[in-house]
Image: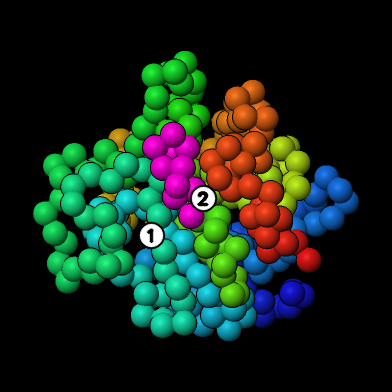
Amino acid sequence: MTSTSDDVRTDRWLRLDGTTNTRDLGGLPTTDGGVTAFGRVLRSDNLQTLSDEDVRRLLEDLRLSDVIDLRTTAEVLLEGRGPLRAVAEVTHRHLSLLPERGHHTDVFAVEEDEVPDLPADWAETVLPRQTTEADEVEPPAVRSYLGYLHHRPENVLAALRAIVASDGAAVVHCAAGKDRTGVVAMFCLAVAGVSDEEIVADYALTAEVIEALVAKLRRSPTYADDMTRRDVASHTPRAATMRRLLEILGERHGGPLGWLDEHGFGAAEQAALRAKLRD
């Protein structure tokens, strides 16, 4: 896909009216001298506030076919249906990376007209610190990411499989597009053959838009309290966080690909994902 003055893409960033942290996983060098392809996989913050023009551009210019939503059921129900939910041609998958609480486990099947009664502690899962005892020595963000892999490995794999199965471009998103989305993006890039340092740099790129991102989330009642209680610096992704996650995956599993292989996403599926991400 070539860039033009009217293109939605400026370099890897997608400049949309309704999002703050949307970018393409294309354009990154691989260790074998290749490059990841544009227009295959996007990573983003919440899509609830996309404008009509945003939707048109995503559908017509980028051929968006799949939305992979990593938020909790509570987040989705409280935020309401985004504009892409009305597009029949777009497949939506809800794959929370957090343990779901209560009886609402398939938000797109439920589709309530009103927000149902939710567990009193649902808010703890919005920006959670799920972890295991063995990882308590790690920094908070690293513990969170390891928690995703410990509690919901099946949904990490399901997100990758959804990308492989997508007919056009797939967008992976959560609320901010940096933590849950960052972990899925890490696996995508690792499978594509992108180096650890490039993966770390992509993760840290969200820092360029963090003030606008926090301001956006503060305008939503769903996230306002957490955004207000902690300062912008505490929400800013740091290269050391992703670097440490990659180190741990290397120590315990031989790297991201080893973790995938151990959890049933083997050589054939990795090859299919690699083909999706590269020309």
Colour pattern of the rendering: rainbow
Checking the image for residue 192, the label placed there is none
Judged from this view, the residue extending furthest toward the top is 137
- Look at the image and tell me in which quarter the C terminus lies: bottom right
**Which of the 4 quarters of the picture holds residue 269?**
bottom right
CA–CA distance between discs 2 and 1? Answer: 13 Å
Q: Nearer the viewer, residue 70 or 255?
A: 255
Q: Position of residue 274 (x, y in %)?
A: 71, 56
* Residue 182 magenta: no
Point out residue 3 in the picture as x, y percentages from the top left corner: 74, 74
Pointer 2 residue = 157
Q: Which residues are magenta?
A: 148-158
* Side of 188 relative to 173 (left or right): right
Q: 122 or 279, which is in the foreground?
A: 279
Where does the image place residue 100, in percent across and percent down from the top left?
A: 28, 46
Residue at 32% x, 42% y: name it: 99
Q: From the image, tell me which residue sits under label 1.
A: 94
Residue at point 27% right, 67% down?
Answer: 109
Q: Residues within 10 Å of mark 1 (few under 14, many from 20)?
A: many
